[in-house]
Image: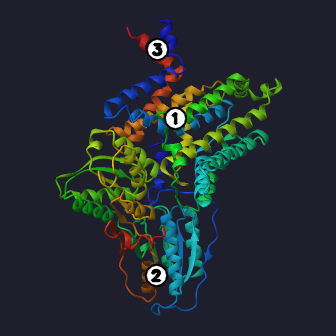
């Protein structure tokens, strides 16, 4: 009984449970839930991971930023910029896929550096610092695309969003790769400790000798890079850079994913896998709703209700109250 | 659909976005005068007039084509155009209209950013005896005399035409998937209603699945992907998308599912942008119903009549074509947007 209690109160339990339940429902609704044809995986389950890859990438970067007590509102706009940059390189300069990818990632990293500099060096509030790029970023992307949707045809680049390697979509490999790289760096160095201590108490960390500014700068750059990669996948997926709509409001989904994953917005402890589970909960709901017959006007409400439920179940205060109610029953 | 929680609040702002749903923010630019040419070059010798035009912004290819049409027509007819870009902000548009009144232009035309909140500034224009033309979007007001005329698209008729075309193409027999625009927006509501009207006469035409693709390519693709994994979706023979971008996204999803867009599934959409014509050329899209952005000629037709003191109709719908494999080649090379 005690061990069951420990499982139930684990940070990942409720989001994982909701995700599994969602998948069961999706399996019931879908005619192609999972299959392997021509050596490739196919089906609704695959769609959840492929469509969720963008928010998963954003959530990886976002969880580091949030763990330092910051927030990055600009990731959606950065996606638009990186997609626009790579599409512009592909069309206006007939660049190779490698150059386009480097360009997109580079511009994402520069955006992250800008955010990081404002926060770490000039002491701006993270919400304000990243709000600047959130509003201006889409304008920058439109300057690059000249206000139009740039359509391109480039098989190698489009593989980022549509291609497969070893039968698994490349976008899923990219998420896995990013998870392993970030996970390895934070756990094999003392970076996790530094990030969590900054999020808990920045002043004490500085006094204790943690390079606060450098770590902060780093997490925003990583977030920018993740957003850049998500932007490339977004553009590759539709073979076009849509500066108006690419990544629109995805910063909110990413923050939601991190919170569902069990992190506190005030900073401190973080879990990379938790953030990924959070992103999958959000995408699993979306795909299930699209597969079901929920009416257009009800879809947002359905999503909101489930999200509120997950967040409540994770709240110790809510759980304590629930337990008291159950115990009181004769 | 990715848009969560907070976005419901912003939907009302996107509401009126006709043929492309998006916004940007940037500092408001000053009102500028386009260079005017002295004397009409070739058209009928109409009285030279000054028209103030307050544009929404430059949020889409459609809007850019709209702006260019108005500027080109002013130059062609030798009228003076005072053009203001409101960058998606109502206060900028109100400021521009006030400055047009102060400058004493002959006619004011504008594409309202939002539906409400125009009564005060339009009353000022009315008091100054300047006629007002609404371009491509309507406003909500108790007092219909505050504006003189509306020129633009009939979204419902676009939906009807799409339905009629599909009924002819499929001999009145189709299981239809529908990709709706942004929920609550006028083009989405009207295009849905018009299509439903048109297919109501055909008992064997049924919409089997309907979801919103938010007018974007990415969502069009994602929703179609999900549709194709449902029993209804697998049996579907036709797709109706409220704009071309969603249809273009859906085409990719159909291909990924191993079906042939344009053959296994007949596709009809609305807008008539360049990429849609290219898709028709490739045989992947079957039909696009035009939503014409070239409003320069009808606006100046109305303005000339107003200045000459003639009566004008309250509503003028723009001329719009229906393009499929038979006639797309006539216009594909001239299509700029």
- A73 and A37: which one is in front? A37
- B221 and B306: which one is in front? B221
Disc sitting over residue A172 in the figure? 1
Q: Give the label, 1 or 3, closer to the camera.
A: 1
- Tell me how far mark 3 sits from mark 2, CA to CA: 72 Å
The answer to whether marks 1 and 3 mark residues whose Cβ atoms lie closer than 8 Å is no
Disc sitting over residue B285 in the figure? none
- B159 and A99: which one is in front? A99
How far from the left and from the top, in percent, is residue A202?
75, 29
How far from the left and from the top, in percent, is residue B162?
30, 61
Is B164 above or below relative to B319? above
- Tell me how far mark 2 sits from mark 1, CA to CA: 54 Å
Task: Provide the residue designation for mark 3.
Answer: A323
Mark 2 neighbour class, 10 Å CA radius: few under 14, some 14 to 19, many 20 or more: many
Q: Give the label, 3 or 2, closer to the camera.
A: 2
- Tell me how far mark 1 sits from mark 3, CA to CA: 39 Å
Is B76 above or below relative to B6? below
How far from the left and from the top, in percent, is residue B209?
30, 45
Secondary structure, mark 1, is helix
Mark 3 neighbour class, 10 Å CA radius: few under 14, some 14 to 19, many 20 or more: few
The chain letter for the residue carrying disc 3 is: A
* Left/right of residue A257 with respect to residue A118 in the rendered view: left
Q: Give the label, 2 or 1, closer to the camera.
A: 1
- Residue B294, by quadrant, is bottom left
Task: Provide the residue designation for mark 2.
Answer: B300
């Amino acid at each position: 009984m005690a061990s069951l209690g420990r499982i139930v109160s684990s940070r990942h339990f409720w989001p994982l449970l909701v995700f599994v339940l969602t998948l069961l429902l999706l399996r019931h609704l879908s005619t192609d839930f999972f299959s392997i044809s021509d050596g490739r995986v196919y089906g609704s389950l695959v769609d959840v991971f492929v469509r969720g890859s963008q928010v998963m990438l954003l959530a990886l970067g976002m969880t580091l930023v949030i763990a330092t007590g910051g927030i990055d509102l600009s990731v959606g706009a950065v996606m638009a910029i990186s997609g626009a940059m790579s599409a512009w390189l592909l069309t206006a300069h007939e660049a190779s896929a490698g150059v386009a990818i480097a360009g997109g990632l580079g511009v994402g990293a520069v955006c992250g550096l800008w955010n990081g500099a404002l926060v770490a060096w000039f002491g701006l509030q993270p919400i304000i610092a990243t709000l600047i790029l959130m509003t201006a970023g889409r304008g920058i992307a439109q300057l690059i695309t000249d206000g139009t949707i740039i359509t391109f045809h480039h098989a190698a680049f489009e593989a980022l969003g549509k291609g497969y390697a070893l039968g698994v979509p490349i976008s899923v490999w990219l998420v896995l790769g990013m998870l392993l790289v970030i996970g390895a760096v934070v756990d094999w160095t003392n970076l996790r400790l530094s990030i969590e201590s900054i999020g808990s108490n920045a002043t004490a960390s500085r006094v204790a000798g943690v390079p606060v500014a450098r770590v902060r700068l780093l997490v925003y750059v990583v977030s920018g890079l993740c957003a850049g990669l998500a932007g490339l996948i977004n553009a590759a997926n539709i073979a076009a850079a849509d500066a108006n709509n690419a990544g629109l409001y995805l910063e909110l989904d990413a923050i939601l994913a991190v919170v569902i994953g069990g992190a506190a917005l005030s900073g401190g402890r973080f879990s990379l896998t938790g953030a990924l589970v959070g992103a999958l909960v959000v995408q699993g709901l979306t795909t299930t709703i699209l597969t079901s017959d929920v009416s257009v006007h009800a879809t947002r409400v359905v999503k909101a209700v489930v999200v509120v439920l997950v967040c409540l179940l994770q709240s110790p205060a809510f759980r304590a109250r629930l337990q008291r109610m159950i115990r009181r029953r004769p | 659909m990715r848009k969560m929680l907070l976005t419901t609040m912003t939907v009302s702002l996107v509401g009126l976005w006709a043929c492309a749903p998006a916004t940007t923010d940037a500092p408001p630019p000053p009102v500028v005068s386009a260079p005017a040419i002295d004397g009409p070059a070739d058209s009928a010798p109409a009285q030279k007039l000054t028209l103030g035009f307050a544009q929404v912004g430059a949020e889409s290819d459609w809007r850019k084509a709209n702006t260019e049409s108005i500027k080109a027509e002013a130059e062609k007819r030798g009228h003076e155009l005072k053009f203001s870009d409101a960058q998606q902000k109502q206060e900028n548009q109100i400021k521009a209209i006030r400055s047009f009144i102060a400058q004493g232009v002959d006619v004011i035309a504008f594409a309202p950013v939002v539906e409400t909140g125009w009564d005060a500034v339009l009353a000022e224009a009315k008091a100054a005896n300047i006629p007002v033309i609404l371009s491509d979007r309507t406003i909500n007001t108790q007092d219909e005399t505050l504006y003189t005329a509306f020129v633009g698209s009939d979204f419902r008729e676009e939906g009807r035409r799409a339905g009629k075309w599909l009924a002819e193409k499929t001999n009145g027999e189709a299981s239809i998937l529908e990709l709706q625009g942004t929920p609550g927006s006028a083009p989405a509501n009207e295009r849905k209603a018009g299509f439903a009207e048109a297919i109501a006469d055909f008992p064997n035409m049924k919409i089997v699945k309907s979801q919103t693709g938010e007018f974007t390519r990415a969502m069009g693709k994602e929703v179609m992907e999900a549709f194709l994994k449902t029993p209804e979706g697998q049996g579907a023979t036709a797709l109706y998308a409220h704009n071309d971008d969603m249809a273009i996204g859906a085409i990719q999803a159909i291909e990924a599912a191993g079906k042939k867009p344009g053959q296994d599934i007949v596709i009809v959409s609305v807008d008539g942008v360049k990429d849609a014509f290219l898709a028709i050329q490739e045989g992947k899209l079957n039909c696009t119903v035009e939503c014409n952005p070239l409003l320069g000629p009808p606006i100046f037709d109305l303005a000339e009549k107003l200045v000459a003191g003639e009566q004008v109709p309250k509503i003028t719908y723009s001329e719009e074509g229906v393009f499929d494999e038979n006639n797309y080649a006539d216009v594909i090379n001239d299509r700029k947007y």
